[in-house]
Image: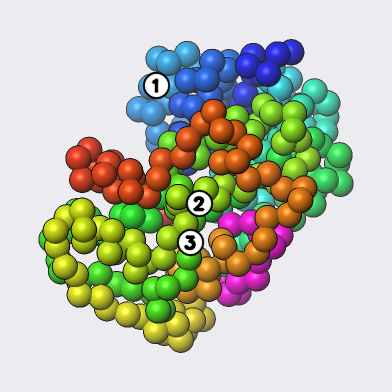
Amino acid sequence: MEEDMSKILVFGGSGYIGSHMVRASIKLGHPTYVYSRPHSDHTEVLNEFQSLGAIVVKGQLDDHEKLVLALGEVDVVISALAYPQVLDQINIVEAIKVAGNIKRFLPSDFGCEEDRISVLPPFQAFLDKKKKVRRAIEEANIPYTYVSANCFGAYFVNYLLCPYDQRQEITVYGTGEAKAVLNYEKDIGIYTIKVATDPKACNRVVIFRPRTNIISQLELISLWEKKTGRNFSKIHVPEQEIVTLSNTLLDPLNIPVSIIHSVFVKGVTMNFEIGEEDIEASVAYPDLKFTTIEELLDIFLHDPPKPASAAFE
């Protein structure tokens, strides 16, 4: 089957990042399927997908026969399931083993590269679940691509800068000097579909680390000040205060705090080298182009995206 005709099935396709992958798959011409709960709350977005030509398959993640049947219709499987459903991907792995026809599986990573970093316990417990899914995929000899998309750019611009508020204070976590990688969600969708159907990306880790999207909190604030003509007071939250919160907040509230510490205090998206066997997306696919941080801020100035309500999916 030709690369551009691969049939793609997305789990979690009506969610925050999954919806971008579904739209990208349709845009790039792939026959696109979305596996959704029978009584999903996301009726509007599912109707949109159907109007664009996607096929919505209704089923539960623990319905083995339904999963096998759905998988038999496609070539590539992408999981964008959110945090509470991470281990449900083991059901998908078991179904892929039975179906026997899947050419590529992309599990629900799309954040930090979990095999390369060490983080605070609440976040580490989350990453350990993702690592368990990876090991199950490898043990089953299922062709895979692991995508480390790093930070969801629009989400974190909202989170860090609060661009819709008129307040003059911006919270800075730690010193504000750690570097992080912020990628626009629409780009994450397009690049994910690209790598999912690229033979070169089979059984490899793909990292989205374009040079134009590496930035610290202080640099981000400075750039926003220049674009808006405003000056903000910076309220620093000490690292130890964040660590204490991660130890005292109940699960799952302790996970976002731990993520903030890992990404914006410790800089985990930038504190390891890209290996020889890894693929860095912006270099590997020069025909595509990541939206730069500056361009993303221009979008917020002139055509503000809808604030994200689903945090840390």
Picture coordinates of residue 290, whole percent (x, y): 46, 39
Picture coordinates of residue 241, whole percent (x, y): 41, 84
- Regarding residue 78, the answer to whether it shows in the image is no
Residue bearing the label numbered 3: 180
In the figure, 186 relative to 31: above or below?
below
In the figure, 123 relative to 40: above or below?
below
Q: Residues within 10 Å of mark 3 (few under 14, many from 20)?
A: many
Q: CA distance from mark 2 to mark 3?
A: 11 Å
Residue bearing the label numbered 2: 211
Please give left or right for residue 58 compared with residue 206 in the image. left
Residue bearing the label numbered 1: 47
Q: Is residue 119 magenta?
A: yes
Magenta span covers which residues? 112-122
Marks 2 and 1: which is nearer the front?
A: 2
Marks 2 and 3: which is nearer the front?
A: 2
Q: Is residue 114 magenta?
A: yes
For residue 14, the mark is: none
Front-most of residues 31 and 2: 2
Of the two numbered discs 2 and 1 on the same chain, state the one appearing first in sequence.
Answer: 1
Of the two numbered discs 2 and 3 on the same chain, state the one appearing first in sequence.
Answer: 3
Q: Describe the element under mark 2 as helix, strand or loop.
A: helix
Residue type, label 1: Asn
